[in-house]
Image (tube, grey):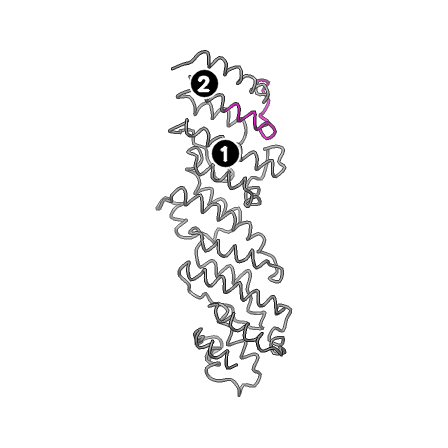
Amino acid sequence: EIDLENDLEKMGFILNNLNDLGILDGESIDFINKKDVVISLIQTIFELSNIQGNEGVIIKSLFEMTGIPETLNSVGIAVNYEVSDWAEEIDLFIGVIDNFIKLLQENDVESIENIDFQNILINSANSPITRNLIESICESEMFGANLIPLVDKLFEIAELNNWKSDYFNDLLDGTKVIDEEDLKKEILILLDIFVKSKEILGTPLAEISTVVLEEMLLKMNDSDLIKLDYIFEFLNQKVIDTKTFDIEKRFENPGLSTKEEWEVEIKNIVDAIESILENNLLEGEAIKIIKEWQDTTKIENLLNIFNHSKIFRQIMPDILSLAITADDYKTDWLKNQCGTDGYNNRVVASVEEWENEIEQI
């Protein structure tokens, strides 16, 4: 039912808002500095009694004046104006607008023209505003249907396309679907990973924060959108290096197949890296440094830490073989673990065998 008195009163407010924004003079909307006016205008329009059935057309006209749809499209988000329930959607829409503008303000953006929203999103991934924006987008019918392309775009922006799991590719081609809450959680995890990856990649191991590294690896393990095997690939290529111990052999994938196994391994890997850093073994000639230790407890602690990591246990035979310079002192048990034909035909002993051996050493 049309309420003429209400609508006339609201039209006065609407005209004032349009004038404040410069729309009546043909100016583009300075929505970054006049966020509250934009939000007030949208709220007032939806208080009109005769708007029903025309919400999508009105919002589309107003929204496109801001330039926001084009910016969102740069990260794979297209806007849907065919909304089933505008009474419920309008608050979510305002939430997106509010958090979007706050994010630009937080990054000192004065104009939406030619902004690099992709990098703003990645660089501000830890900001509560970014998280609020993502949650608003996830819950909104106008934007939520496009979140899988957004995630795909995030992988592309971060130059991490090879991280994507088969499950994510199935979501991308529509073979599988994901619950809204699960997707929201995944996007927030990914944003956190991308921020931490920028801190880790290109940073020498001696300067890496092991706290940040552990957080990132555990987040990678938490995500269903990142393939599990890439945790090892990332470590092997970007973080750990057998050459620290003058060993030419690269680490091999330990073949861990579950998140539970990787969670344990990640903690053990970080313990091993911390031990390497604490003992200054990155400064070169690590084997020589170990041989000069007078405190046997240090050797025992290092070997025990390595032993509990499936990745670092691989080089324990090599470390001891290099430390024992006289070949006559090396047993077949040790030699076989180093490989009888270069690095071929090697089977590293179990945790239990090495625990017993470490006590004897």
What amino acid does circle 2 point to? Answer: Leu
Query: Residue 207: which quarter of the image?
Result: bottom right
Relative to 162, is 283 above or below?
below
* Magenta part of the chain: 24-42
Image position, residue 211 (x, y; %):
56, 57
What SS does tag 1 mark? Answer: helix
User: In the displayed image of the protein, which residue is found farthest to the bottom?
Assistant: 328
In the image, what residue occupies the spot 44% across and 43% down? 184
- Residue receiving disc 2: 48
- 10 Å neighbourhood of mark 1: few (<14), some, or many (≥20)? many
Image position, residue 322 (x, y; %):
56, 79
Q: Which mark is residue 96?
A: 1
What SS does tag 2 mark? Answer: loop
Q: Is residue 128 magenta?
A: no
Query: Residue 257: which quarter of the image?
Result: bottom left
What amino acid does circle 1 point to? Answer: Val
